[in-house]
């Protein structure tokens, strides 16, 4: 809920500013800086196929400043949340559970209202919007976070929508996939009404993650929760929509009442293939507001390395939140989740769990299949496998999996139409791979070899150590404080020659009773 704001309550309006986060990432070596002039036609090539974000200081004839790929790395997103990458899911879940305040500030105090353009001043084609893929229908604004008020509830709905330039005041907008915004818009169309909407361009990574979440709540406070701080908001110039007051740009306007009436696309989609031309609504711009030194933002989507794009990284984290909640219900001790970005941040799901009962790996597979529509392949492993290490996952698949025993295949699930393997069908199959060791079986044949363990010396001789209980060679080295091992061989040889040495289960040495 918003509240009146006193001067001494003014929040720090630069703490979550995108430009400041980018400057910090430059200092940490996470951003490539290009100071020389770059034509808009060359921007996409500068961004494609790099794990680092790119800051271009002189783009197009306007010499605009543009950043791309800032959320194209789990490490950078984690830095935005102040944690290490392996702690990100835990931190996101923690913030989602902790409410934060909103404070509404006056227009004259809002950085994003430092420059206001309305009427004939509006010209979307003056923004540094570039062609992202060679067969795209037009240049796209791709880092646009939408804010709209649901007339039925009064809640703010928040999402991510691309905008295809159609002229100075019009864009296309992709509104085909099932979403809250599509439902809200279609209710307006059925009543012959326009839908006011605003797009923030140039937002902190926390805001981007909030925008991709799918939760049945008022989503403006959700932005505050993921920031972990009070959110300053300001009412738009031409509508009652409130938006974060500290973003770089806001593009205000409305979706007209004519419905899905105009061609939009094609567009290089997040899964690494083109989406075809669709009939979509038209967005009409009524105002552009920005900071005086605004930094334009573009999101990397598709290309040769989709795992390094903004879209797949954000998709993966959002999906991990969904899957984690389902796993907490389905199994006793989930340990970790990694939804690979190279699969679009949704198709290939890796789950680590500690089985407490037989069958929990299958329960986990079923939970993921049911909770995440786009999940296509689910791999479940024991905690000793690093789900972020492709080599370890490959090893687990090679050595812990039998297809006739450990493969779970189900069909008839709702599928993502962008998946070309569907051949035009609307439903598809899912597969689960149980890569866990059989429950309760942890013999030597299932034990992973490790280097020498450490420990304290407990015995003065090999004979004394073995008199206590059987020991492996490594355990004998630890027990006698050996830093070499060859003297252990000589001691064992003497015991063997004397007829006093034997071997027991798993090859441990033991003093013979004979």
Image (cartoon, rainbow, N blue to C red):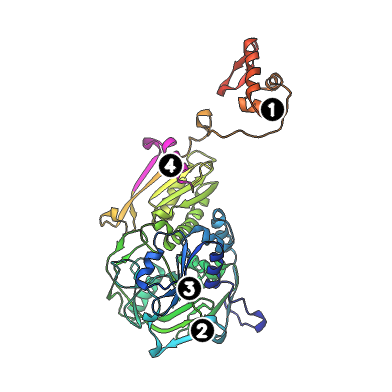
Cα distance between the residues tagged 1 and 4: 36 Å
Q: Which residues are magenta?
A: 389-410
Residue 193 in the image: x percent, y percent?
A: 36, 82
Label located before the other in sequence (4 or 3): 3
**Image quadrant where residue 280 sits:** bottom left
Most distant residue in the bottom direction:
120
- Considering the numbered disc 2 on the image, is that residue within a helix, a strand or a loop? helix
Asked if the residues shown at circle 1 and circle 3 are in contact, with their CB atoms under 8 angstroms apart, the answer is no
Q: Earlier in the sequence, mark 1 or mark 2?
A: 2
- Mark 1 vs mark 3: which is more N-terminal? 3
Residue 423 drawn in magenta = no
Gap between marks 1 and 3 measured at Cα: 61 Å
Q: Please tell me whether mark 3 sits on a helix, a strand or a loop.
A: loop
Where residue 100 appears, x then y in whole percent? 60, 70
Q: Quadrant of the N terminus?
A: bottom right
How far apart, in angstroms, are the residues tagged by discs 4 and 2? Answer: 52 Å
Q: Which residue is mark 1?
A: 479
- Per the picture, the main secondary structure of the magenta-coloured stretch is helix
SS at circle 4: helix
Task: Identify the residue position indicated by label 3 in the image.
Answer: 202
Measure the alpha-carbon separation of dots 2 and 3.
14 Å
Which of the image's four quarters has the C terminus?
top right
Label 1 with label 4: CB-CB less than 8 Å: no
Residue 283 appears at what percent x and percent y?
Answer: 36, 79
Q: Residue drawn 37% across and 73% down?
A: 39
User: Alpha-carbon neighbours of circle 1 within 10 Å: few (<14), some, or many (≥20)?
Assistant: many
Q: Quadrant of residue 188?
A: bottom left
Q: Which residue is mark 2?
A: 113
The disc, 1 or 4, on the residue closer to the chain's N-terminal end is: 4
């Amino acid at each position: 809920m918003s509240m009146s704001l006193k001067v001494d309550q003014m929040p720090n309006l630069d703490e979550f500013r995108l430009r400041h986060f980018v400057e910090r990432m430059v200092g940490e070596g996470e951003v490539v800086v290009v100071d020389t002039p770059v034509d808009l036609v060359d921007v996409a090539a500068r961004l494609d196929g790099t794990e680092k974000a790119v800051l271009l200081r002189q783009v197009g004839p306007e010499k605009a400043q543009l950043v791309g790929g800032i959320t194209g790395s789990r490490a950078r997103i984690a830095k935005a949340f102040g944690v290490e990458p392996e702690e990100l899911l835990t931190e996101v879940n923690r913030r989602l559970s902790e409410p934060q305040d909103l404070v509404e500030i006056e227009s004259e105090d809002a950085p994003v209202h430092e420059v206001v353009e309305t009427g004939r001043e509006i010209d979307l084609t003056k923004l540094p919007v570039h062609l992202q893929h060679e067969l795209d229908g037009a240049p796209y604004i791709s880092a646009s976070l939408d804010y709209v008020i649901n007339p039925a509830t009064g809640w703010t709905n928040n999402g991510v929508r691309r905008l295809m330039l159609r002229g100075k005041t019009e864009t296309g907008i992709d509104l085909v996939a099932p979403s809250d915004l599509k439902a809200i818009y279609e209710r307006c169309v059925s009543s012959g009404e326009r839908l006011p909407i605003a797009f923030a361009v140039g937002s902190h990574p926390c805001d981007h993650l909030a925008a991709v979440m799918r939760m049945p709540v008022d989503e403006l406070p959700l932005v505050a929760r993921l920031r972990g701080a009070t959110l300053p908001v300001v009412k738009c110039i031409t509508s009652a929509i409130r938006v974060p007051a500290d973003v770089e740009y806001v593009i205000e306007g409305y979706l007209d009442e004519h419905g899905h009436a105009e061609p939009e696309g094609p567009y290089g989609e997040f899964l690494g293939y083109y989406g075809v031309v669709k009939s979509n609504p038209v967005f009409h711009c009524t105002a552009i507001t920005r900071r005086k030194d605004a930094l334009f933002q573009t999101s990397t989507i598709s290309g040769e390395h989709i795992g390094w794009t903004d879209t797949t990284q954000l998709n993966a984290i959002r999906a991990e939140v969904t899957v984690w909640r389902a796993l907490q219900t389905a199994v006793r001790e989930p340990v970790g989740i990694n939804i690979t970005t190279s699969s679009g941040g949704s198709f290939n799901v890796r789950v680590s769990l500690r089985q407490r009962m037989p069958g929990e790996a299958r329960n986990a597979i079923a939970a993921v299949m049911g909770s995440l529509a786009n999940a296509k392949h689910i791999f479940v492993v024991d905690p000793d496998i690093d789900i972020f290490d492709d080599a370890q996952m490959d090893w687990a698949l090679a050595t812990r999996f039998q297809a006739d025993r450990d493969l779970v295949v189900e069909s008839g699930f709702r599928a993502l139409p962008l998946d070309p393997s569907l051949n035009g069908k609307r439903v598809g199959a899912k597969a689960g791979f149980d890569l866990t060791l059989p429950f309760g079986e942890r013999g030597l044949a299932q034990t992973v070899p490790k280097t020498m363990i450490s420990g304290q010396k407990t015995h003065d001789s090999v004979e004394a150590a073995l008199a206590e209980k059987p020991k492996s060679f490594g355990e004998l080295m630890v027990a006698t404080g050996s830093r070499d091992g060859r003297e252990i061989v000589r001691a064992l040889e003497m015991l063997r020659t004397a007829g006093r040495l034997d071997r027991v289960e798993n090859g441990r040495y033991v003093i013979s009773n004979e």
